[in-house]
Amino acid sequence: MAHEEQKQNRSVRQRFELNGRNYIVTGGGQGIGFAVAEAICEMGGNVGVLDLRQTPVDEFHTLAKRFGVKTAYARTDVSSAERLQAGFDQVMQTLGTLDGIFTAAGIAIDKPFVDQTPDEFMNIQKVNVFGSFYAAQLAVKQMQKQKTKGSVVLVASITAHRMASYNASKGGVFMLSKALATELAPFGIRCNTISPAFTDTAQTQVVRNADPTNAGVMWSQPPLGRIGEADEMTAAVIYLLSDASSYTTGADIAITGGIHVGRKTDYAMHINGAPSS
Ligand SMILES: NC(=O)c1ccc[n+]([C@@H]2O[C@H](COP(=O)([O-])OP(=O)(O)OC[C@H]3O[C@@H](n4cnc5c(N)ncnc54)[C@H](O)[C@@H]3O)[C@@H](O)[C@H]2O)c1
């Protein structure tokens, strides 16, 4: 569509619609990935989920009927290029063509830097960095084959202490997105990241169970005064996947309750002159 024609044909609401479009979500078997898969369906898009889980959360099976869209699920491991390719090919049989990908598959460990082993470090990089790289690459190859534009949304993170391997991996994902944004722009393929902070999913549950202090921090330290919910990540991802963000690439959206700019207690200190208890 010519640029002038495009300008006349778009309302804000229409630009967010994903009707008839096809997306892949890695790590969409639960958590943030599932919330985004559901949101894609709500906006009219078809979704293929790739995840290590044997089966996705039960609700996944309701999406096609609830929203009148197509869904597909393939069990795969994003850290293995071969297995990922097989899962990708499987869901593409349902989707046919592809308009974008959201790469939510990720793992974390919470341990002091000096205790993290080479195997633990490598495993995190393989899932978070290699997995995002391979999945984005498959999606981009598909979109280039189709000669269509598209959107890649990767998941970075604001980071936490005691998570050295994880932080290194998310730094890799963040910088990967910068390279893709510039390199793929001539193909009409955009690439952006979201950076969640503490979100109430299985990933943070493990950390919170390990040490109640962590749970306290997640609830007390974000300036908005609480942990985030998975469905609070979804609108930003829909924005980035849809035409609503047609002039946005190389961007990162921090969805953090404000903790990427300061802790709630820092602010209390500033106004009261003393740390809050
Ligand atoms: N929860 C948070 O506070 C938080 C904060 C910042 C970033 N993130 C990131 O958001 C993304 C989603 O995390 P979440 O909180 O929903 O976690 P989650 O553990 O609930 O979900 C992660 C999903 O990824 C899948 N997965 C893990 N390893 C995989 C592999 N090798 N191959 C395929 N699938 C695999 C899991 O089976 C699971 O369904 C991750 O990249 C995570 O690092 C989460």
Image (cartoon, helix red, strand yellow):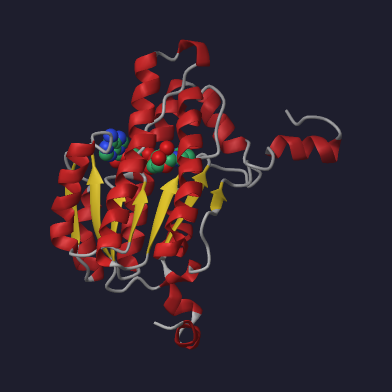
Residue 257 x, y percent position in the rendering: 59, 47
Q: Is residue 243 visible?
A: yes
Q: Residue at x 30, y 46 (%)?
A: 135
- Residue 183 versus residue 83 in the image, above or below: below
The one nearer the camera, 276 or 266, is 266
Q: Where does ligand 1 appear, by image quarter?
A: top left
- Residue 189 versus residue 2 in the image, above or below: above
- Residue 263 versus residue 234 in the image, above or below: above
Residue 8 x, y percent position in the rendering: 49, 88
**Number of numbered discs overlaid on the protein picture:** 0
Q: Is residue 61 left or right of residue 103?
A: left
Q: Is residue 72 left or right of residue 6?
A: left
Residue 134 x, y percent position in the rendering: 30, 42
Residue 6 x, y percent position in the rendering: 45, 83
Split into 4 quadrants, where in the image is the C terminus? Answer: top right
Q: Is residue 174 left or right of residue 81?
A: right
Which quadrant would residue 14 be assigned to in this image?
A: bottom left
Which quadrant would residue 29 be assigned to in this image?
A: top left
Q: Residue at x 30, y 67 (%)?
A: 147
The one nearer the camera, 166 or 203, is 166
- Of all residues, the one furthest to the right in this rendering is 273
Split into 4 quadrants, where in the image is the N terminus? Answer: bottom left
Q: Residue at x 40, y 21 (%)?
A: 121
Q: Is residue 26 visible?
A: no
